[in-house]
Image (tube, grey):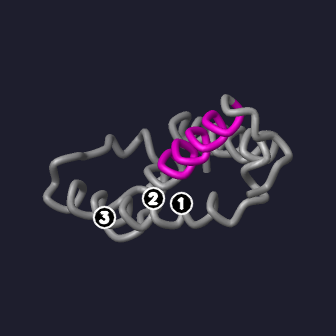
Amino acid sequence: MTVPAYTLAGIAWLGAAIVATWWAGAARRRATWLALTAFMAFTVVFDAVLTGLPIVTYGEPSITGIRLGTTPVEDYLYGAALCLTAIAAYDAARGRRGRPR
């Protein structure tokens, strides 16, 4: 099975976001993982609505076809990567590296 470029990009971005979160010091804080959990919970709800109606659709060649409900797994890759990137960028900008709160 060939993995679509959209999926590979999502995996790469999520991997980079996890590294950046660790580097910024945010990975050692419980608040980071609580924020990610809350963000992903909202993502599940709103993506289910958007893809279920269907307001948002995906070209099948662009995704793996793996879905959670009506939502392609790629949406969750990008959502988690977005959340972690924002947290890491904020912490890095604030100079919090290595100082768990």
First to last magenta residue range: 78-92
Does residue 54 appear left or right of residue 27 in this picture?
left
What amino acid type is highlighted by mark number 2? Phe
What amino acid type is highlighted by mark number 1? Ala
For the point 42% across and 63% down, the residue is 67
Residue on which disc 3 sits: 70
Tell me where residue 18 appears, x and y as whole percent. Answer: 72, 47
Q: State the residue in front, 25 or 43.
A: 25
Q: Quadrant of residue 3?
A: top right
Q: Residue furthest bottom?
A: 69
Q: Nearer the viewer, mark 2 or mark 3?
A: 2
The kind of secondary structure the magenta stretch mainly shows is helix
Quadrant (top left, top right, bottom left, bottom right) of the C terminus: bottom right
What amino acid type is highlighted by mark number 3? Thr
- What is the spatial separation of the Cα atoms under label 2 and label 1, in whole angstroms? 6 Å
Q: Nearer the viewer, mark 2 or mark 1?
A: 1
Residue on which disc 1 sits: 35
For the point 75% across and 54% down, the residue is 27
Does residue 37 appear left or right of residue 60 in this picture?
right
Label 2 or label 3, whichever comes before in sequence order: 2
Residue on which disc 2 sits: 39
Residue 13 is marked as: none
For the point 62% across and 62% down, the residue is 31
Label 3 or label 1, whichever comes before in sequence order: 1
